[in-house]
Amino acid sequence: MRLTDAAVAIRPRNAWEAMDLGVLLARRHAGLLTASWALMTLPVFVLLSLLLWQQPGWAMFCFWLLKPAFDRLPLHILSRSLFGDTPRLRDALRALPGLLKPQLLASLTWRRLSLTRSFDLPVLQLEGLAGKARSQRLTVLGFGESRPASLLTVIGAHVEWALWAGLTALLFLLLPQQVKTDMDWQKLLDLAADENRWLWVEHLSNALYALLLIVWEPVYVACGFTLYLNRRTRLEAWDIELVFRRLRQRLTGVAYLLVLGGCLLLAPLPRPALADDAHSCPIPAEALQPTSKRLTHQALTSDAAHQAIEGLLGEPPFSNTQTVTRWRFGNEEEAEEAGDPAAINGFFEALRKLMLLGKHLEGLAVALKVLLWATLIGLLALLLWRYREWWFAFARRLGRPWPARTASEPPTLMFGLDVAPESLPDDVAAEVERLWPSHPREALGLLYRALLSRLLHRFQLPLKSAHTEGEVLALQRGLDDAELDAFARLLTGHWQNLAYGHRSPPDALRAQLCEGWRALERRGDTA
Amino acid sequence: MSPIPPSADPAAPPRAGLLDTRHHVETPEGIDLILRPAGLLPRSLAYGIDLLIRGGLMLLMFFLLIWLGRFGMGLGLILTFLMTWWYMVLFEVLAQGRSPGKRFMGLRVVHDDGTPVGWSASLVRNLLRVVDMLPFGYTLGILSCLANPTFKRLGDLAAGTLVVYRDEEPQVPALPEAPAQRAPFSLSRDEQNAVMGFAERHASLSAARRTELASLLAEPLEVPAEQAEARLNGIARGLVDPL
């Protein structure tokens, strides 16, 4: 064992983290572990099922009993691969007979029910301890760590159950509808009672268990193994040894052969009983016969009378059985059983009184109802209000103009430019031409203001003072007017160059812009 | 006895790809946060505890509300709704990612980047329990938890959340008495930690093991093997109270 070769980060962890590491370890070698487990267990399972075809329960029990023996192979693989020596599938299976030999009987019988079995297995298999040495070692190792190990087994049993139930439910979901229609719970229960015809159902359920173990059992073994590793890491400070070795290597530069000695002085502490010997259950005392046979010499014996009475009671006027299947709350039953039979009258009396009280509470119930409905309506109203913009947009998309929006007051100032129609001269183009040679900035500004004003008042474009030049351009594009678009683009581009970039427009532009504007004005007037 | 015979140790440089339960998150400031994701076993136990608590509360509620007639029934339905869909969400968001079961197991829910879990993530991960439960008894959740390197179930994958162990308060164990000394060579941070750990954990190590560990460094320390342990304790003391 070379700690420096370990494939996991060695560090003292808490017990749960150690088990998480086990899950990761099993995940890394998932292919090898599941393949070897399947190759080992499935033939045994098939054999057991065939041998015990008439007793599926026993087949299952035998398979379950053999689990500790199967566990040894995953542990062998994990312990080898921990230090980078991952065996191949064939080698692992070949090693199996040797692994099974030590203490097999004990594992399968009196230690079978030990809750810490996955934690104990490495002591037996990897350290090769037996008898007293083993129990002493387990006492030392298990001190403070046996509770998580037990919980691991308990949770593992639940995980197995959950996976089994999940697989069964999956199978049931996959049944075609035609099969399902004439199958209900009543019939399923009957099936369970009628064993001979439906053996294969039980064998199928067993097979599901064998299949889910392929996934779960290697993880369980790996968790027990890492729990064991973690305990040893804590007890023997493996992490410190690792760093010390590296440090010495760094300082001396020479590799030494050092023996990791028998490292623990083990106090001979009593070994806790891990699994009590199984005792056979005492045969239950035979039920006492309430009535012995009487009137045996009469024409009508007590037996015959009894049978006749039973027969009569079983016929319609007395017996009127009906099977009613319905769903109900699980709690209902408990509430019904809550009363002691002796105090049942008092119980019902109290119940009646409380029901009367309940009548008074009807008013409260109505109030609560009103409150809840009011809350719901209020929430809906809030939702409508919160997303009113969205609703407006939606309504506009449907082609209906929204009066509230168009009625809003158009702004008079944009980018600090006055866009009210009153502020513009009557003949914009002439004014622009007059200003252009001396004050190009004012000239272009005037033209741009005039454009904005026209967009606002002639084309009814809903511009806001927060819009930028680019947004105005994008908005006017929505008007779908090619001529206007070309003009607005040209003007905006040069206006931006001048206003922000202080780049004067070329002289040739003057005539072009003024012409464009006049054309726009003419078109607007005739329209 | 060791399970596998020990051998020489040419201290290799730390290799990449070591299997570890830690999950590193690097912040934009270049700080490495260490999260410790919790696996299937503690999580299922925490869920079991929560299930018990909820079951108990529902039973209690049922007995109290049955006396209130229709009013009680209505109230009961509302509370059942809250218990089913909001129990986990409210606890996770309002109690630092911890439902009572998680608190008991020392777990908490955080976003993938270690930030506290928010409303949307918590809602998503808890609503998707319905998917994790398919086909029955959390089968998909269990399989996903086993297969994911950070132990996420499907709800966690969708919401981008992690269930991690809460960090415990660090404890400062007493160092063995020794005169403070200076190390005769420079020590990296890992090595300083190891020396400190050696001194701090002296109570949990057997005397033989302590001697064995210390003798690894006897030669570089230039002391006989018997005195290496005292020397290391002295160096540890010197690291705590610099000379």
Image: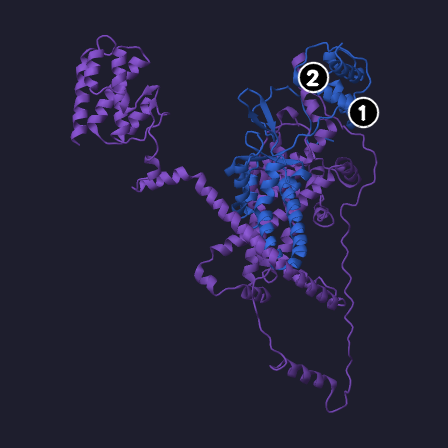
Q: Which chain carries label 1?
A: B
Say which quarter of the image contains residue A20.
top right
- Can residue A456 be seen? yes
In the image, what residue occupies the spot 81% across and 20% down? B176
Q: Mark 2 lies on which chain?
A: B
Quadrant containing the C terminus of chain A in the rendered view: top left
Going by the image, does A209 lie left or right of A347?
A: left
- Of all residues, the one furthest to the bottom in this rendering is A299
Residue beneath label 1, please? B207
SS under mark 1: helix
Going by the image, does A190 lie left or right of B175?
A: left
Residue beneath label 2, please? B192
In the image, what residue occupies the spot 25% across and 26% down? A454
Closest to the camera, between mark 2 and mark 1, is 2
> Could you say which is closer to the camera, residue A322 or residue A366?
A366
Rendered shade, chain A? purple
- Can residue A95 be seen? no
Rendered shade, chain B? blue
- Of all residues, the one furthest to the top in this rendering is A438
Quadrant containing the N terminus of chain A in the rendered view: top right
Say which quarter of the image contains residue A235.
top right
Provide residue A191's location: percent of width, then percent of height.
56, 65
> Could you say which is closer to the camera, residue A422 or residue B74?
A422
Task: Give the mark, 2 or 1, whose residue is nearer the N terminus.
Answer: 2
Provide residue B74's location: percent of width, then percent of height.
59, 55
In the image, what residue occupies the spot 82% across and 18% down? B177
> Could you say which is closer to the camera, residue B161 or residue A274?
B161
